[in-house]
Structure formats: C-alpha cells, structure tokens
Image (cartoon, grey):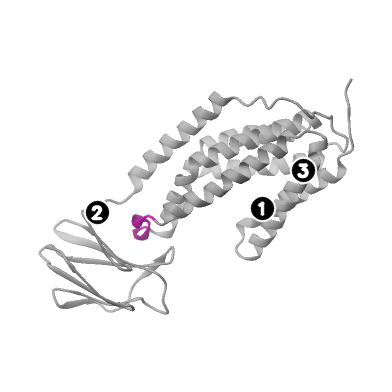
Amino acid sequence: MERRTLAKNAKSLLYWGSILSLFSLIPIIGSLLGLIGVILYFVGLYEWKDVDDRPFTLGIVQLILGLFYVVLLIIGMESGFFSTLSFSKAFYIGLLYTYPLTAIVTMLTRYQVQYFYEATEEESFLTAKKLYLVGILTFPFIVGIFIGFAGRIFEIIGYSHMTDTPKVLKGREFGIDIRQMGAIFVYALVLSLLIIHVMIPRYDITLRKGKVEVFIKKGEVYDVKVVYHGRCWGSCIKEISVDGKVVYWGNSYSYVNDKQIVTLKISANSSMLTINAQDGVYTFSLS
C-alpha cells in the first residue's frame, strides 16, 4: 500500500537553499549567500529523510568529495607553470584538474534528482537528470557548463512544483550503476589529461631561488618568464638585468594567482640573469 507524508517544510528548504547556492558565483556577498544556501539545502535533505534517506546520504558523499575538489584545485593552481598562463587559461586548466571529480559529483546528483522524481513524479527532475549527463560529457568544451547550469535550473523548478505530500520511499536500494560511474570517471580523466597536455606550456629551462622562478624557452631568442611568488605594493620585481644590462625596470607586469609575472625576450647567448626583487637580489646562470 502506497504511503505518503507531508514534506512542505523540506520542500521549501530545498527550493530556497538551491536558489541561494547559485549566488556563490558572485564574489564576496555571494559567497556568504551561497554558504547559507548550502546549509539550508542540507537541512532540507535531512528533513527529506522522512520521505527518502537516499538523497541525504548522497549529499554527504558529495560534500566530502567537494572538500577533495578544493584540495585538488589548490594543488593544481600551485603548479609552477600556472604562473605563466593568462587568468582565463589558468582558470580553465584548473577546472580540468577537477573534471573527473566533478563528473562523479554530477553523476551522484543525477541519482538524487531521480530519487526525487520517484517520490514526487515531478517531470522537471527527469529533465534535470538528462541535462546533467549531457553537461558533464561536454563540460571541457565550455558549453557543458551552461547545459549543467540549465539542469540546475530544472532541478530548482522541480523543488518548486513537486507535491507537498510525496510517496514514502525510506529504505529503498540506491541502485547505483558502478560500471557507468566508472566509465564516466575514466572518460573525464582521459579527456582532461589530453587537453591539459596540449595546453600546458613547455619550457627548456626552469630555475628557482627563493620566491623567484624563471621559465625559459630556447630559440633564436630566448622567451623568458620571470615569476615572483607573492603580491607587493606595486611591482615586486624592481629591476632585471641580463649580463649587466638593465632590460626591465618594473614598468610592465601582470598578476596570476597572487604571482607577479614579467615576460622578456633575451639574446640566446646570454649568460647571466639578475633579478632585483623586493626581498633581495637573485642571480641565475644561463650558461
């Protein structure tokens, strides 16, 4: 015999929590609203346990994976070559570093919305499920991000339109297809590694002393990127000399991930690079 229960409060928490979590994309105030949204959403999942305990369990798993996501992103962005990229490229490769994990989290979200559909028969959840799959498969091609966002919108619509008296499904099997999850993970891992391999710049010489790192690509002239790990008031790198001749005096630089970058071209027969930085003088032999 089918059992139903009143879940109006859980429905409201899931709906408003999901909406507020979207604000996390906005800097500063958005982060606070996003955090409030995540908390409300998890409270909603907890209350939904009277209906079905599977979404809450998967939510906890996603939260744990989210912590790994942050760690992977930090480790990836600390890699030396990130300092030589534009912000947009660094951001994109950062996303690729976490793509396999994002794929697993998204696949778990697909099961969550499936469980909500089973309890409410709200069709928007099925639409969200389809969009999430297409989105995660096309995620590295940017369009997938927008498709996944559309899936999130349909999920929110599902919370808004679902019945206040869903079917009670406590104790149901998860029914997770491990082979499908594994296939998606391998697909994401291989694709991300291939794209990262193509996009990562390659240098013939990499040197580092203290906070200063030097990347050199050989050719008829040497392409040089000097990286200072840390922010300063103005330019951290005051002056750069090649074989005693000043070639840079703090006039042109950029910042990526709190690292100052100076780009130079120097003669292929250069033998000594001297960098006068805020915290001292660094000398590198190029011969």
Q: What residue type is labelled 2?
A: Tyr
The residue identified by callout 3 is 46
Mark 3: give few (<14), some (14-19) or many (20+) Cα within 10 Å: some
Front-lying residue, 184 or 141 = 184
285 and 19: which is toward the camera: 285
Q: Which residue is drawn at 67% across and 57% down?
A: 35
Quadrant position of the C terminus in the picture: bottom left
**Precedes in sequence: disc 2 or disc 1:** 1
User: Is residue 263 something one can see in this rendering?
Assistant: yes
Residue marked by disc 1: 22
Q: In which quarter of the image is residue 236?
A: bottom left
Q: What residue type is labelled 1?
A: Leu
Q: Where does the magenta region start and end? A: 79-85
- Which badge, 1 or 3, is on the more N-terminal residue? 1
Disc 2/disc 1 C-alpha distance (Å) = 39 Å
Question: Which residue is under mark 2?
Answer: 203
Place of residue 54 in the rendered image (x, y in percent of width and height, measured from the top left): 72, 33
214, above or below 57, in the image: below
Estimate the x, y position of residue 268 in percent, counting from the top left: 12, 62
Asked whether the beta carbons under mark 2 and mark 1 sit within 8 Å of each other, the answer is: no
